[in-house]
Image (tube, helix red, strand yellow):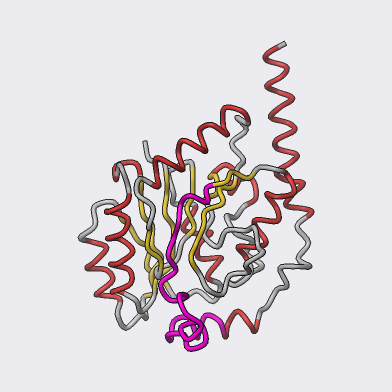
Amino acid sequence: MKKFSLILNSRGRPALLKDFLDSVVKTTSNLDDIEVIVGLDKDDPELIDSLNILNSCAFSSYWVGGRPPNLIGALNRLSTLAVAPYLYILNDDVIFLTPSWDSVAWSALAAHSIKFPHGVVYGRTQDLSIDKDKDGKYSAFPIISKKASEILGFCIPTEFYSLGGDVAIYRIFEKIGQIVDLSSIIIQHQLHQTLEQVMNPDLTAYEMRQNTYKNRMDWKTFNVDDYVWKLQNYINEYDKKRNKINE
């Protein structure tokens, strides 16, 4: 059984994609427990290079389609293909730094599931990004239970085209108190190591940001109440049924 589905989009970055996969190989304690699912654009000039890299990786699969206007929507579509109980939402410009990250995450999430068997949970990992809000408790690259994504209909709110969605999903889980601290799992965000990199992005990031700004959502004022209700209602009903069985 797979334990984690690593989900990401990739465009124009075959070298970074390879770095990502190499880091997964180096830091994962059991590759049989994971799968990597990558969304690719059929109009990507470097598509063939990315396909060659993914085809040489036994634990990866991919979906090729038209370039999505909404990157979060694309991630949510990929999440429906996942078979593992936990979804790790990532970028193609990250690398894993923590040895045996999968064992660390699985142990913490398994302990949480004993106390809260409803299966709704958010894992807060840590990333090294120079532009991340230093006071922010959210994770730029969270682990979200497949059960929660099925209840919500997404792993990240689709109202966000890209930027800000990570904060919005954290706010949802924060309100229901279902967050597991996985900050010992550290991700390096390759293209966000210096201010120069952030201010002078590559073409992929530049075009993504332009599209996001045209469809900008304010993560601070974004109303999460309906989504909080969905998860809390599921948890309440689950607990009622469980208590009735144990009576």
Q: Residue drawn at (30%, 67%), measured in percent from left and top?
A: 19
Measured from the top left, where is residue 180 in percent x and y? 59, 43
Quadrant showing the N terminus:
top left
- Left or right of 88? Residue 213 is right
Q: Residue drawn at (64%, 61%), measured in percent from left and top?
A: 157
- Left or right of 104? Residue 242 is right
Q: In the displayed image of the protein, which residue is found farthest to the top?
A: 247
Nearest the viewer among 54 and 220 is 220
Nearest the viewer among 135 and 47 is 135
From which residue to which does the magenta span run?
A: 182-209
Nearest the viewer among 27 and 213 is 27
Q: In the displayed image of the protein, which residue is found farthest to the bottom?
A: 200
Residue 187 colored in magenta in the image: yes
- Left or right of 85? Residue 99 is left
Q: Residue drawn at (50%, 65%), measured in percent from left and top?
A: 74
Measured from the top left, where is residue 109 in percent x and y? 52, 38
Measured from the top left, where is residue 16 in percent x and y? 33, 72
Quarter-wise, where is residue 233 in the image? top right
**Image height of 106 relative to 64, above or below:** above
Residue 68 colored in magenta in the image: no
Quarter-wise, where is residue 158 in the image? bottom right
Measured from the top left, where is residue 103 in percent x and y? 39, 40
Quadrant showing the C terminus:
top right
**Image height of 113 relative to 16, above or below:** above
How many numbered dots are placed on residues in this image? Answer: 0
Q: Residue drawn at (45%, 38%), measured in percent from left and top?
A: 106
